Image (cartoon, rainbow, N blue to C red):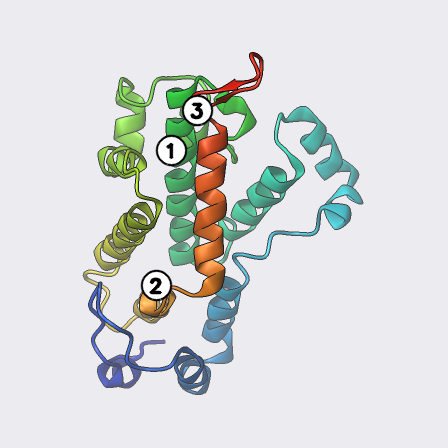
């Protein structure tokens, strides 16, 4: 099904601008205008930050065996399961979106590992081509990685931004560009509606820096600082 009337009636979204339509109103509009089958894809996107419960996962012996075969923490393993669910969606758009974000987050994690001398095996999640390459090689000297991930240079450049808030903004700008590129010639397809939803979500996230967001950024700053502490010598290099 196509959505000419729905898309034509939506406000244009511009990165960096304030969102116009309240997010709850957008969701109601989409639910009214989309088929239940297509709106289920919106519901899938809403759940993408809710990683599966670790206890429920461990009730599956096959999943439990996979967990024991990895070096991942429980949280990272849950994240891996979340990505795998998304990458098995019936929607090609959702599969591509989840894989793009998996690659983005894995490269960011690999950049931290390379900078601080950590083992990437402990933080890289998933088992796609990019994840397999990141577990083995150097970020900046791997032709296979560059071929598998066209956005590699941009992601590495973002990982080097010291200001945490600015880094987050650049990450969302890259996500925004990916959505634009993916839907460039699709016009009124359901993919355009899904991309609009995700871009609207990005704008709403940046409308105001809430207290919760500020606390999260502060926690991330503390984590970065802790990486510079030499516990072996009981001295700090901060």
Residue 58 visible in the shown view: yes
Q: Give the residue drawn at x 29%, y 53%.
A: 169
Name of the residue lying farthest toward the top: 233
Contact between labelled residues 2 and 3, with CB atoms less than 8 Å apart: no
Question: Label 2: which residue?
Answer: 202
User: Where is mark 1, residue-wise?
Assistant: 107
Q: Quadrant of the N terminus?
A: bottom left
Residue closest to the eye, 126 or 17: 17
Residue 124 coordinates in the image, percent (x, y): 50, 31
> Where does the image place residue 233, in percent across and percent down from the top left?
56, 12
Measured in 3D between alpha carbons, the distance from the residue under mark 1 to the one under mark 3, in whole angstroms, is 10 Å
Judged from the image, the secondary structure of the residue bearing numbered disc 1 is: helix
Disc 2: CA contacts within 10 A as few (<14), some (14-19) or many (>=20): some
| Residue at 57% over, 44% down | 79
Element under disc 2: helix
Q: Earlier in the sequence, mark 3 or mark 2?
A: 3
In the rendered structure, are the residues bearing label 2 and label 1 in contact, judged by CB atoms less than 8 Å apart?
no
Depth order, front residue of 6/28: 28
Neighbours of disc 3 within 10 Å: few (<14), some (14-19), many (20+): some
Residue 203 shows in this picture: no
Sequence-wise, the earlier of marks 1 and 3 is: 1
Q: Which labelled disc corresponds to residue 113? A: 3
Residue 216, compared with residue 154, is above or below; it is: below
Residue 134, percent from left and from top:
41, 25
Residue ID at (22%, 69%): 17
Left or right: 6 as drawn, with respect to 102: left
For the residue carrying disc 1, how many other residues have a C-alpha within 10 Å: few (<14), some (14-19), or many (20+)?
many
Report the Cα–Cα distance between label 3 and label 2.
27 Å
Task: Say what secondary structure mark 3 lies in.
Answer: helix
Of the two numbered discs 1 and 3 in the rendering, the one whose residue sits closer to the viewer: 3
């Amino acid at each position: 099904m196509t959505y000419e009337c729905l898309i034509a009636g939506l406000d244009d979204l511009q990165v960096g601008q304030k969102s116009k339509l309240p997010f709850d109103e957008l969701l109601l509009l989409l639910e009214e205008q989309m088929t239940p089958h297509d709106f289920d894809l919106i519901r899938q996107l809403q759940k993408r930050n809710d990683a599966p419960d670790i206890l429920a996962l461990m009730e599956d012996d096959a999943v439990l065996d996979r967990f024991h075969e990895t070096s991942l923490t429980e949280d990272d393993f849950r994240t891996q399961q979340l990505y795998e669910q998304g990458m098995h969606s019936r929607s090609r758009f959702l599969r591509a979106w989840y894989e793009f974000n998996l690659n983005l987050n894995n490269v960011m994690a690999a950049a931290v590992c390379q900078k601080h001398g950590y083992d990437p095996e402990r933080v890289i999640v998933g088992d796609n081509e990019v994840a397999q390459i990141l577990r083995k090689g150097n970020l900046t000297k791997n032709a296979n990685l560059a071929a598998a991930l066209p956005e590699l240079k941009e992601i590495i450049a973002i990982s080097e931004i010291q200001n945490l808030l600015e880094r987050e903004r650049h990450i969302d700008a890259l996500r925004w560009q990916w959505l634009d590129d993916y839907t460039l010639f699709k016009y009124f397809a359901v993919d355009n509606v899904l991309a609009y939803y995700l871009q609207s979500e990005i704008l709403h996230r940046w409308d105001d820096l809430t207290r919760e967001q500020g606390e999260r950024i502060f926690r991330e700053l503390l984590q970065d600082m802790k990486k510079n502490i030499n516990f072996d010598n009981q001295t700090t290099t901060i």
